[in-house]
Amino acid sequence: MPSSTITELLRSSALKLQESDSPRLDVEILLARTLGCDRAAIYTRGAETLPDGIRGQFDQHLQQRLGGEPVAYITGEREFWSLALKVNNGILIPRPDTECLVAAALAHIPVRESLRIADLGTGSGAIALAIASERPRCHIVATDIDAATLATAEHNRDRHDLDNVELIASDWFTNLGGYVFHVIISNPPYIPDADPHLDQGDVRFEPRLALAGGADGLDMIRTIIDGAPDHLCPGGYLFLEHGFDQGDTVKALLRQRGFSSIECFDDLAGHHRGTGAQWQP
Ligand code: GLN
């Protein structure tokens, strides 16, 4: 392997990764990870040559990425709402679009109030931890059906000292008997089972359990909308992420269940990616 500088390696590796949506960013993250520095430092250290051991490790990571593996699974980490979160291939990789769900919910959670909040199907803990970091007076219950996933969420909670987050193993509301919240938030699985996207790109490496939501993708969304009123204070809110083309159906389901003030919000691409609604019995 001829030695090359960090700058040369960055350019040649990004050229190889043309199948990725973000070749340069991918290489920056993998280089930063192997060097143990942040991404900006790659540019200040551009003239350096990588020591052999580190070069070997980088080449291995690049091969994994060339095989399609998501960067977050290679590094074992993903940033969400400026929080570095541990992830693995049993856990959905937190998406920037889900930060729009967090922002929509935060707009209904006044900073000074001590509200009870639930994040159902928390995965890495992304939504719960983002809300907990912004609203230290609130108590957040984060649930997941999978014990190993919940252990990772716990690791992420402890890493960021967010002790206002309580973790509970639960299949949606099954273990939440007696819990009542001011706000319930969820990014549930919502992709239709037969959607070809499940077998493409980075998504094919992620757990189906976190992605596929039945024939029309809405099975879990129906379960949550159905169960939420039993766990919401009067005037409480439900916020759901859903597919860009599911907004009208989700609105109709919320209306049928008796929710009011139903409003869609957009993702970063301007698609209706989520809906919020109020429970005013
Ligand atoms: N937004 C994700 C995707 O399209 C899906 C996440 C989910 O199902 N909750 O890959």
Image (cartoon, rainbow, N blue to C red):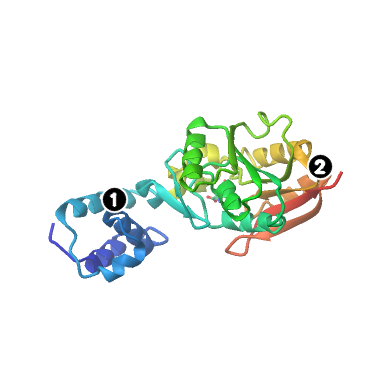
Q: Please say whether residue 119 is visible from this viewpoint.
A: no
Front in this rendered view, residue 99 or 62:
99
The quarter of the displayed image where residue 188 is located:
top right
Q: Distance between the residues labelled 1 and 2?
A: 48 Å
| Residue 233 coordinates in the image, percent (x, y) | 79, 42
> Tag 2: Cα neighbours inside 10 Å, few (<14), some, or many (≥20)?
some
Left or right position of 277 against 12: right
| Residue 169 coordinates in the image, percent (x, y) | 58, 31
- Establish if 38 lies above or below 156: below
Residue type marked 2:
Arg
Q: What residue is disc 2 on?
A: 257
Front in this rendered view, residue 80 or 154:
154
Looking at the rendered structure, the secondary structure element under dot 2 is helix
Q: What residue is disc 1 on?
A: 61
Q: Mark 1 or 2 closer to N-term? A: 1
Q: Which residue is drawn at 41% across and 49% down?
A: 77
Residue type marked 1:
His
Q: Which mark is residue 157?
A: none
Q: Residue at x 51, y 30 (%)?
A: 147
| Residue 260 coordinates in the image, percent (x, y) | 82, 51
> Tag 1: Cα neighbours inside 10 Å, few (<14), some, or many (≥20)?
many
The quarter of the displayed image where residue 109 is located:
bottom right
Q: Which residue is drawn at 51% across and 50% down?
A: 94
Q: Which residue is drawn at 59% across and 33% down?
A: 168
* Image quarter hosting the N terminus: bottom left
